[in-house]
Image: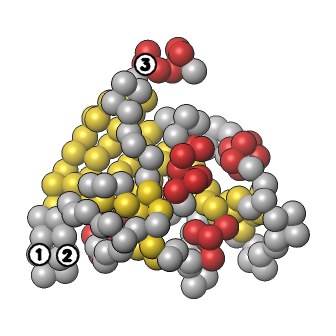
Amino acid sequence: TIILIAAAAENNALGKDNDLLWHLPDDFKRFKKLTSGHKIIMGRKTFESFPKPLPNRTHIIITRDKNYSVAYDECVVVHSLDEAIDLVENEIAFIIGGGEIYKQGEKKSDKIELTRVHGTFKEADTYFPEIDENYWMLTKQEFHPTDEKHKLSFTYLTYVKKESTLKSL
């Protein structure tokens, strides 16, 4: 099972200068809970935005640079999304960004776990792809209002691929 996991604003903004545009502690907790113990697939820039690899997860890093290497045992470097997906057969794996990897991963994934951040960020330089409701069905949503730790409200959205989509792929 391949799952896209992201937090995106209402205009699909993901981030700017390789950083998030908001701070949502509960979303970080959910990300950690869902991805811990699994393989996470990401582009090189996403990986390089972390101070160090995330604990209890195997990082599969996609880069076109054939000489790129990482000095951590929990990291594997590959050169295409297909190569990354070949490493996660019969397992749950999460595609965690960035924008280009999400775009490529949408057709290859089975589920989307999206945190829809209620706001619009015009300064963003990275975006999540538009979710095509012809292919994806919203199966769960959970609203989270603003509070002392969260300046923005957000909604957890779970999408699964529609049956008719699976046949046409």
- Give x and y (percent) for residue 30: 35, 63
Please state which of residues 159 and 36 is positioned toward the viewer in this rendering: 159
Q: Is residue 92 left or right of residue 76?
A: left
Q: Which SS class for mark 3?
A: helix
Per the model, the C-alpha gap separating discs 3 and 2 is: 36 Å
Quarter location, residue 138: top left
Q: Which SS class for mark 2?
A: loop
Residue 159 seen in the figure: yes
Residue 163 - label: 3
Residue count near mark 3 (Cα–Cα under 10 Å), binned few <14, some 14–19, many ≥20: few
Name the residue beneath numbered marker 2: 150
- The residue positioned 72% from the left and 68% from the top of the image is 75
- The residue positioned 55% from the left and 34% from the top of the image is 107
Q: Are marks 3 and 2 in contact (CB under 8 Å)?
A: no
Name the residue beneath numbered marker 1: 147
Q: Are marks 1 and 2 in contact (CB under 8 Å)?
A: yes
Per the model, the C-alpha gap separating discs 1 and 2 is: 5 Å
- Give x and y (percent) for residue 42: 61, 60
Query: Which of marks 2 and 3 precedes in the sequence?
Result: 2
Please state which of residues 62 and 141 is positioned toward the viewer in this rendering: 62
Kindly identify the amino acid type of the residue bearing the numbered disc 2: His
Q: Which SS class for mark 1?
A: loop
- The residue positioned 51% from the left and 20% from the top of the image is 166
Query: Which of marks 1 and 3 precedes in the sequence?
Result: 1
Kindly identify the amino acid type of the residue bearing the numbered disc 3: Glu
Residue count near mark 1 (Cα–Cα under 10 Å), binned few <14, some 14–19, many ≥20: few
Kindly identify the amino acid type of the residue bearing the numbered disc 1: Asp
Q: Is residue 75 left or right of residue 153?
A: right
Residue count near mark 2 (Cα–Cα under 10 Å), binned few <14, some 14–19, many ≥20: some
- Give x and y (percent) for residue 111: 44, 39
